[in-house]
Amino acid sequence: MFSHPGIRELINLQPDGGQAKPYQIQEVLKRIEEFNLSLGDDE
């Protein structure tokens, strides 16, 4: 489970032979765009 302090939804990534499932990647990318998220301390 992954979370972000500013987002109420949780994202569940379960392994599929050691890799995330395609629909899970799509959900993560959708949330990144929807909430304008980025990696690091780019405040």
Image (cartoon, rainbow, N blue to C red):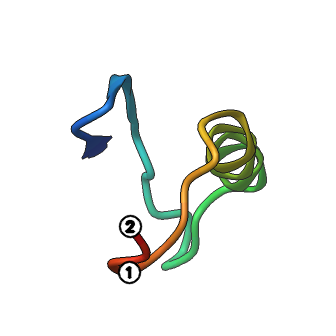
**Quarter of the image that includes the N terminus:** top left
**Would you name the residue on which mark 1 appears?**
40
The outermost residue toward the top is 8
The outermost residue toward the left is 5
Task: Tell me if 16 is positioned left or right of 3 in this view.
Answer: right
Looking at the rendered structure, which numbered label has been put on residue 17? none
**Would you name the residue on which mark 2 appears?**
43
Q: Is residue 1 visible?
A: no
Q: Give x and y (percent) for residue 29.
A: 72, 52
Mark 1: give few (<14), some (14-19) or many (20+) Cα within 10 Å.
few
* Label 1 element class: loop
Image vertical order of residue 29 relative to residue 4, above or below: below
Q: Which residue is rendered at x = 74% and y = 45% of the image?
A: 33
Viewer-closest of 10 and 40: 40
Q: Which residue is rendered at x = 31% and y = 32% of the image?
A: 6
Q: Which residue is rendered at x = 29% and y = 43% of the image?
A: 4
Amino acid type, label 2: Glu
Tally of numbered discs: 2
Between the residue at mark 2 and the residue at mark 1, the CA separation in whole angstroms equals 9 Å
Viewer-closest of 14 and 17: 14
Mark 2: give few (<14), some (14-19) or many (20+) Cα within 10 Å.
few
Image vertical order of residue 22 relative to residue 38, above or below: above
Amino acid type, label 1: Gly
Q: Give x and y (percent) for residue 36.
A: 64, 47
Task: Tell me if 24 is positioned left or right of 4 in this view.
Answer: right
Q: Which residue is rendered at x = 43% and y = 76% of the image?
A: 42
Q: Is residue 17 visible?
A: yes
Contact (Cβ within 8 Å) of mark 2 with mark 1: no
Q: Give x and y (percent) for residue 15.
A: 46, 63
* Label 2 element class: loop
**Quarter of the image that includes the C terminus:** bottom left
